Amino acid sequence: MRAFAERLIAHETLRDNASGNKTPLAILVDDRLRPHLRTLMGNVGFRALLSRALALASAEVPWLRAVHVKADGALEGLDEFGAPVQPTALFEGSVVLLAQVLGLLVAFIGENMTLRLMREVWPKLTFSGLDLGAGDTDEKKQIVRLNANRQKKP
Amino acid sequence: MSRPARVKIRSLPTGVRGLDDILGGGIPEFSFNIIAGPPGSGKTTLAHQIVFANATPKKPALYFTVLGEPALKMLRYQQQYSFFDESKLGKAVRFINLSDVVLDKDLDAVLEEIIQQVTAIGPGVVVVDSFRTVVRKAVAGASELEMQSFIQRLAQFLTSWEATTFLVGEYVPEEMRDNPIFTVADGLFWLSQVPERNSVVRKLQIIKLRGQESVPGLHTVRISTSGLQAFSRTLGLTGQKIRPKRRHRLSIGIPELDTMMGGGILEGDSLLVAGPSGTGKSALATQFIAEGLRHGEPGIMAIFEERPKGYTDRAGDFGLNLKTPQEQGKLEVLYLRPLDLSVDETMQEILDAIERVGAKRLVIDSLLGFEMALAPGFRTDFRESLYRMIAALTGAGVTILSTVEVEDKFTEMSLSHYTISFLTDDIIRLRYVEIDSQLRKMMVVIKMRGGNHSKDIREYVITNKGVVVIHPRTTDYEGLTTGIPTRTGPRPAQKEEAAPEPKAKR
């Protein structure tokens, strides 16, 4: 699950490298998950799911404790904490949060249906399971490169 | 001058077994329908079945959820049903949550959102679940006229966009009079759960269906892992009867009894074997089935009082092998789940089994067990239901042997407490008779609708070969039918008795 989430976050990071204004976490929540999941479960349902995932993720990633889910389902607190948090930590926090969202979805509706939802969110990505194994090779290489670059940054 | 052709209304399948027949062919295309009923009656499951039966990527289904059951939970539970096809999600079946619009805005906004989605997607089927929630919100914030206008606009829009619509809601029958939704609706599907003593029976009524002749009345519904299944109250009364004109006589597996019956039981007849406990009704029924199997006639045994293994093992004690034909698919022993059945469900199970094995012979053992297996409410209609069931099964060309337990009275000989003997073509009565300080068994053929039969009262025993008729008619007694006959002939010398009927060995 973690590897799958990592792949999705890396994909977002690669895709939105040019814009650079939003954190991967903000992109993930505002632009990807929220529009799709809100259509299915409504704002209240999406907020509930994201809040639970955030609570679970905060236990593992302390800086996420400062982040909150707003009434419209967006995350707040990212601006204040986005800058001081190291890019690597920001990346890891996003991965953990997404993994928790995925974990909750799998618990509620099963792996197959979660995958279907994720395919709707990321229609251009190919995956056959909630792991990295099914990704295409070029993308994997890119993720490896990206991770290596992050490690080099202070 | 020829009249212009009338519009042909296409029917959509419901995906619910039995329901298309009840509806008179299916759901009229482009109709505007209500699925109503109390919580837990299967409304959402019915809506899902219709959706999955009809949705295609080209003509998708839009499922609007509103406040009621959270979407994730709905998907969590609905995916447990076999009809739930995950591969249809996303492209063919789309779930859209309207809760935010309903909560934050007014009816116009709700309609606008529906119009926007329907216009963009062009669905063939639209569901709003629960529409009741939309109405509740509307009643709180809008006038009755606004509500009526909303429903009218919604119905007109969805019909114009060639969508068949289902509004799901928790309504009570009293609301039908004043609620405008029931006036606008083309179809009204009413689901209910009726408690009867400790049993609960699910029922469905098609209160209204424009343009089509549906079957009136309450129909039984069962919800299983396959979803809803409906059992028409006229199941079996429709369809072609295939009873042959020239009918063969079938051996019952007891040569002496065949002779008593004028050569055997007529193909397609219904035979009732009545007698008290222990007189060999089940043994006789088993012999009837085994004889059919010997002649290449597959069979079904619907048993209610004993589990199939015990039944099969006991047949083995009589030297009758029921295991191999079951393995070969020539015999099915149906053990029907007791206590909350309807006759229609039982009939459907039996009809399905008959079709599966191509059965020619059927045993129902016993009618009393069958009655006990029914939910209490169905027991009051047992005779009528039985009449329908026997007519349907014999109409399908199947020869039926039913057993019924009767209490032996030693003043008279009753046939059965159901007074159902008029339902059967042939009757064999088994009973105990006290002779020489022994409780012996005798049988008599009471009735053979298709021809003449022996009037003899014959003694029989149950051995390790099953029921065996042992003696010719005796003229040494009179009053045998009372169970306490009077000897009129000479009394032979009595000797100490060896058991006249050794028990079958296990």
Image (spheres, coloured by chain):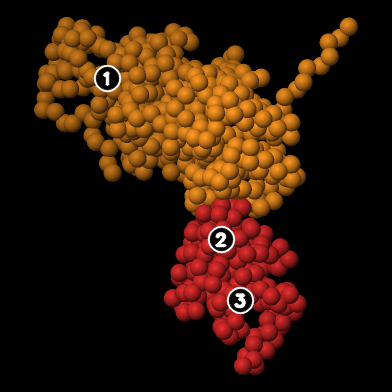
Mark 3 or mark 2, earlier in chain: 3
Tell me residue B381's x, y (percent).
38, 18
- Label 2 marks which chain's residue? A
Q: In which quarter of the image is residue B505?
A: top left
The residue indicated by pointer 2 is: A73
Report the side of A19 relative to B390 (left or right).
right
Residue at 74% over, 34% down? B161
| Crowdedness near tag 3: few (<14), some (14–19) or many (≥20) residues, C-alpha within 10 Å | many
Can you say which quadrant of the picture contains the N terminus of chain A?
Answer: bottom right
| Crowdedness near tag 1: few (<14), some (14–19) or many (≥20) residues, C-alpha within 10 Å | many
Q: Nearer the viewer, residue B189 or B273?
A: B189
The residue indicated by pointer 3 is: A6
Position of A93 relative to B410 (above/below): below
Position of B204 relative to B120 (above/below): above
Amino acid type for the residue under numbered disc 1: Val
Tell me residue B478's x, y (percent).
21, 7
Amino acid type for the residue under numbered disc 2: Gly
Measure the C-alpha gap from mark 3 to mark 2. 22 Å
Measure the C-alpha gap from mark 3 to mark 1. 75 Å
Amino acid type for the residue under numbered disc 3: Glu
Q: In which quarter of the image is residue B16?
A: top right
Mark number for residue B406?
1
Color of chain B here? orange
Whether residue B212 is visible here, answered yes or no, is yes
Report helix, strand or loop for mark 3: helix
Tell me residue B22's x, y (percent).
57, 25
The number of callouts visible is 3
Can you say which quadrant of the picture contains the C terminus of chain A?
Answer: bottom right
Report the side of B119 relative to A65 (left or right).
right
Residue at far right of view: B1
Chain letter, red in picture:
A
